[in-house]
Image: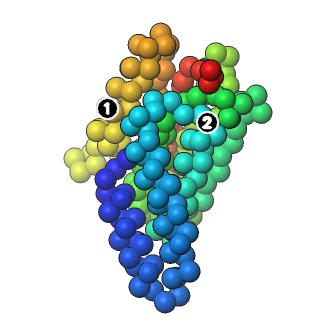
Amino acid sequence: MNPHFFFNALASLQNLALADNKKDQVPSFISKFSKIMRQSLESTFNEMDTVENEIAFLTDYLELQKLRSENRFSYQFFVDDKIEASELLVPGMILQPFVENSIEHGFKNKSSEGIITIDFTLKDTILQIAIQDNGEGLHVDENHKGYPSRATQIIKDRLYLLNKKYKTNASFVIENRAAGDGFKVVVSLPIIYRS
């Protein structure tokens, strides 16, 4: 998780606490922030987590980001009926950097509402997770080189270790959609159930 998120979240909390008309949001903000901190710390010990827990983490993260950005965006999760969300495992926090990229870069200069969709689908022998937004898309130029390379490398390394351990072909693909239609990331993971 980007360290700037924690600093920005605390700054937003400070602003909420000082604003007379928003003080009632402070307890909710603190609760979500503490859950995110706890899950972030626990993810350093737990390699895998359930789809259910991953969705709960992302929901808290997204709600906190919505508070920070004054509801500039909305989000939706879709989970295939064939998925047992409380039993199917995914690498913990593997999706968060892609979601963060949508909020911090895709919606940065967007005047209309941003929308993020996160789709969990079973395709033959893999779990496919698609993260899409309607933001600006990826721009590769001198000032902005697309998706942050540090986060991309960390995800590649984690998937490499997952593939080595389980002898699978986990991967991700970033698709730049048509101009103004955002971007899409498709993460393909092995189907691993909790034992």
Establish if 184 lies above or below 20: above
Q: Residue placed at 50% from the left, 30% from the top?
A: 48
Nearest the viewer among 47 and 188 is: 47
| Amino acid type for the residue under numbered disc 1 | Gln
Nearest the viewer among 195 and 161 is: 195
Res 187 seen here? no
Q: Residue placed at 56% from the left, 80% from the top?
A: 24
| Amino acid type for the residue under numbered disc 2 | Val
Where disc 1 sits, the SS reads helix
Q: Which residue is mark 2?
A: 51
Q: Position of 63 compared to 17: left or right?
A: right
Q: Which residue is mark 1?
A: 153
> Where is residue 148 drawn, in percent x and y?
32, 43
Q: Residue placed at 46% from the left, 23% from the top?
A: 171
Are there few (<14), some (14-19), or many (20+) residues within 10 Å of tag 1?
few
Which sits earlier in the primary sequence, circle 2 or circle 1? 2
